[in-house]
Each structure stands twice: as C-alpha cells, then as structure tokens.
Image: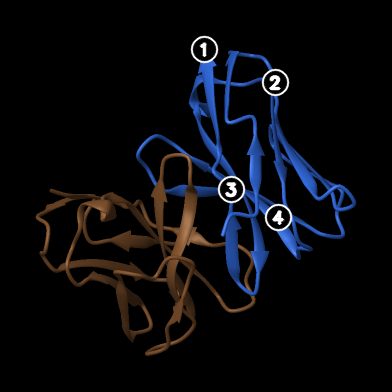
Chain colours: A blue, B brown
Amino acid sequence: SQQGEEDPQALSIQEGENATMNCSYKTSINNLQWYRQNSGRGLVHLILIRSNEREKHSGRLRVTLDTSKKSSSLLITASRAADTASYFCATDSNYQLIWGAGTKLIIKP
Amino acid sequence: DVKVTQSSRYLVKRTGEKVFLECVQDMDHENMFWYRQDPGLGLRLIYFSYDVKMKEKGDIPEGYSVSREKKERFSLILESASTNQTSMYLCASITGGGDTQYFGPGTRLTVL
C-alpha cells in the first residue's frame, strides 16, 4: 500500500540551484525517512526525522516535518550533477516501511 | 561497513521457470525484506521475515514465496515465473528496534 506521496514526480534544475521535494502521508508515524536511488542501483538512506522533530540537517540536506499537515520536505542546497537521482520518502509502521513513488531529480550542468 | 548483497544484478528467465533470488546480510539483522520496484509505483513489499524460519506476507505476495533458513540469508522464490514479474527486486534488512533499512543493489529480473 502506498502511503507516502512525493511531489513533484520529476524536477529539473540547474547545477548550483536548490531542489525541494515534498512528501505527504496519511496515517500517524514514528519517523519519516528519505532515500536516494541512482539510476539502476539500490537505495541509500539519506536522513531520518522522528515524529517529535521538526527539522533536521545533514550536510547539504535539510528535512522538515509537519505532523499536523502530515507532510515533509527535503531540501538539497547547492545542487551538484551527482545529486541526479530518484528520491523516495518512507514512513514506518511496525518495522515495515511504506514508500512513495519517488521524485526524479535531474541536475543540468 | 554494512553490507547487503544479492545473488545477481541482472537475470533473464523464461515464463514458467522457477527463479531463486538470494539476499545475504552481514550485520546480524533480525528483519529482512523483499520489495519489487516498478516505474511510477515506488517500492512494494512482497514478503518480510523477522526471524529465522518466520515469514510474513507483505502487500503483494501472490506468485512469490520466501525462505529464511539462516539469519543472514533471505531467499525470494518465483515458483513459475510470469512476464508480469519482470521488475527490479530489492532486498533490505534492519535490526530489531532499528530505524534504518539497509538495501542491496537490486536484481533486475526479466521474464520472457
């Protein structure tokens, strides 16, 4: 079952610009995670934000969580060509992750 | 460095063949998962296991079975492969009480 819904489905920006992706979900959560997947490869965990946290940073990544709106955003600052990938949010429920369909991010040189 | 490996990166099989996909993790994780990933659908959970010889159905178990004889190994079995099982298959593991799933590189299966 799909709970996370990423928005937009695809995003194309110039290198150096910031990229923002959003995720909405339907039920209460313990935490929300963001993953990256490069073309044809496995997923890589980026960042986890717990339900009692509102904002978290990791390097060029900034994640916010609004539990009242059941939404999260992932901001990548100063984008690089290597950031070209698909980005997925996942919400947890009893050690299972419920995934969205992903946002495809393309960074143009 | 944590590691989840899958037996094949690419696999081509014929309709009706029995297919085994193997996943091995070296982190002593209790929980292991099999997902399939299709364009526009994200990841969908097929089966998961929270202990040796234990298994639970996920969202789309039909046409699949699993085996967990050892803690580090979780196998996905397609008893009689069909063309609609052409997909990317991803294995993951997580320790009990842990937050982060660790993923293997994926197996791209094509059923002709």
Residue drawn at (9%, 55%), measured in percent from left and top?
B14
Residue bearing mark 1: A108
Label 2 to label 3, Cα distance in Å? Answer: 22 Å
Q: How packed is label 4: few (under 14 Cα within 10 Å), some, or many (20 or more)?
A: many
Q: Is residue B86 left or right of residue A31?
A: left
Residue drawn at (57%, 44%), measured in percent from left and top?
A88
Residue bearing mark 4: A32
Q: Position of residue B107 (x, y in %)?
A: 28, 53
Label 4 to label 1, Cα distance in Å? Answer: 28 Å
Residue drawn at (35%, 70%), measured in percent from left and top?
B62
Q: Reply above or below: B69 against A35.
A: below
Type of residue at label 2? Asn
In depth, the one of B48 and A57 nearer the eye is B48
Type of residue at label 1? Lys
State yes or no: discs 2 and 3 in contact (Cβ < 8 Å).
no
Instruction: Give the farthest residue toward the bottom.
Output: B53
Q: Position of residue B106 (x, y in %)?
A: 33, 52
Label 2 to label 1, Cα distance in Å? Answer: 12 Å
For marks 3 and 1 on the same chain, the one whose residue lies earlier in the sequence: 3
For marks 2 and 4 on the same chain, the one whose residue lies earlier in the sequence: 2
Q: Chain of mark 1?
A: A
For marks 2 and 3 on the same chain, the one whose residue lies earlier in the sequence: 2
Q: How packed is label 2: few (under 14 Cα within 10 Å), some, or many (20 or more)?
A: some
Q: Which mark is residue A18?
A: 2
Label 3 to label 1, Cα distance in Å? Answer: 25 Å
Q: Secondary structure at mark 1?
A: strand
Type of residue at label 3? Gly
Q: Chain of mark 4?
A: A
Q: Position of residue B22 (x, y in %)?
A: 26, 68
